Image (cartoon, helix red, strand yellow):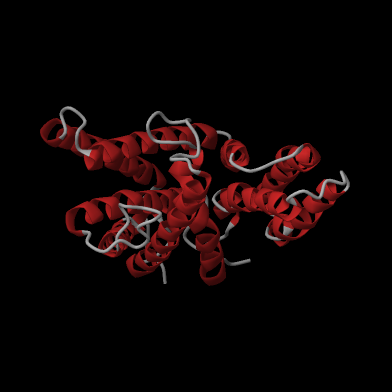
């Protein structure tokens, strides 16, 4: 059973208040502990909070256009992320048709299907139909050099940047008792919890981190930091239950799930960057990387979060 929630306007105001509070605390910490920018943890926290402001402002702006506006926003983000991913892949002239189809056919069709709420098709369109179409387009050019590697990279780019990204606005298509006309807040819940996990695990790693998870991939990700970050994000999710249609314990479990998947998603995306010999996916945000650097954890968490919520809470 779900609990009664606050009026929508109060919830929006409360989220804005949380952002203001986080900003004030981060600025005070910088003034006290990192006046010259020497504390990486404090600088990372301030940068992420600024990113949250930007994300919140964009979501608020595009939400004026209703669900279609939010779907369009994440479609634009997927385009930017796909562009970043493609720049790190090995491509030949024979792949031009496959790349063009990815950007100008597959991506818009996927988000159109999400906008239409066509669940039976947008969950298989890229994993099945685009998966088979792209190698056909490349094979028709007759270039067999590194064929499998080239095609696999394109398919990976589509799965991560388009398919996974599309599951964030897909939350708006769910019908959850108590969540009518408020699903934008569930979307905010997912982003806040997963983004917070990044900062929290980093902070816990700096404080008590001893044993690194994968030293050759990341020097800052430790087992202690991961456990502390996920536990903290779980508590944060429980505290934010009032913006969701869920009871506190349900919000806590969903936050724990999203935080865990998001953490390992960040690790996977870091492995790709290390393999390609780059620090960041792109230069979109000065000193903070590109779209994928900011959203890598959300990209992995979104499909899992969406399907678990749909399975347990969605009503036809």
Q: Is residue 267 left or right of residue 197?
A: right
Residue 61 image position (x, y, % from top left) = 50, 31
Q: Is residue 72 left or right of residue 219?
A: right
**Looking at the image, which residue sits at the far left?**
32
Residue visible at 18% across and 33% down in the picture: 30
Quadrant placement of the N terminus: bottom left
Residue 90 image position (x, y, % from top left) = 66, 43
Residue 189 image position (x, y, % from top left) = 41, 52
Residue 116 shows in this picture = no
**Closer to the camera in the image, 5 or 85:** 85
> Total of numbered circles in the picture?
0
Q: Is residue 89 left or right of residue 179?
A: right
Quadrant placement of the C terminus: bottom right
Q: Is residue 58 left or right of residue 99?
A: left
**Closer to the camera in the image, 213 or 292:** 213
Residue visible at 48% across and 58% down in the picture: 301
**Closer to the camera in the image, 93 or 29:** 93
**Looking at the image, which residue sits at the far front?**
145
Q: In the rendered view, would you say 94 is above or below 31?
A: below
Residue visible at 40% across and 63% down in the picture: 260
Residue 212 shows in this picture = yes
Identify the image quadrant of residue 96: top right
**Closer to the camera in the image, 265 or 117:** 265
């Amino acid at each position: 059973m779900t609990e009664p929630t606050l009026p929508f306007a109060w919830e929006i105001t409360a989220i804005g208040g949380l952002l203001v509070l986080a900003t004030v605390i981060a600025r005070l910490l910088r003034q006290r502990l990192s006046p010259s920018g020497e504390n990486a943890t404090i600088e990372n926290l301030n940068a992420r909070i600024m990113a949250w402001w930007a994300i919140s402002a964009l979501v608020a702006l595009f939400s004026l256009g209703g669900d279609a506006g939010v779907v369009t926003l994440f479609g634009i983000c997927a385009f930017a992320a796909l562009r970043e991913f493609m720049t790190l892949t090995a491509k030949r002239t024979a792949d031009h048709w496959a790349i063009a189809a990815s950007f100008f056919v597959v991506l818009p069709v996927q988000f159109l299907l999400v906008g239409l709420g066509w669940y039976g098709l947008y969950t298989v369109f890229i994993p099945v139909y685009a998966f088979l179409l792209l190698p056909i387009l490349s094979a028709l050019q007759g270039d067999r050099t590194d064929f499998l590697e080239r095609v696999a990279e394109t398919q990976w780019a589509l799965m991560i940047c388009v398919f996974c990204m599309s599951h964030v606005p897909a939350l708006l298509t769910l019908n959850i008792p108590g969540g009518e006309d408020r699903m934008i807040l569930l979307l905010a819940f997912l982003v806040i919890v997963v983004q917070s996990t990044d900062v929290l695990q980093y902070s816990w790693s700096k404080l008590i981190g001893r044993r690194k998870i994968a030293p050759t991939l990341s020097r800052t990700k430790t087992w202690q930091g991961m456990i502390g970050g996920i536990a903290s994000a779980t508590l944060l999710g429980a505290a934010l239950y009032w913006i969701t249609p869920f009871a506190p314990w349900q919000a806590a479990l969903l936050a724990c799930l999203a935080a865990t998947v998001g953490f390992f998603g960040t690790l996977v995306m870091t492995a790709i960057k290390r393999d390609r010999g780059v620090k960041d996916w792109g230069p979109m945000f000065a000193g903070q990387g590109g779209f994928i650097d900011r959203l890598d954890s959300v990209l992995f968490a979104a499909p899992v979060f969406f399907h678990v919520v749909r399975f347990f809470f969605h009503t036809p």
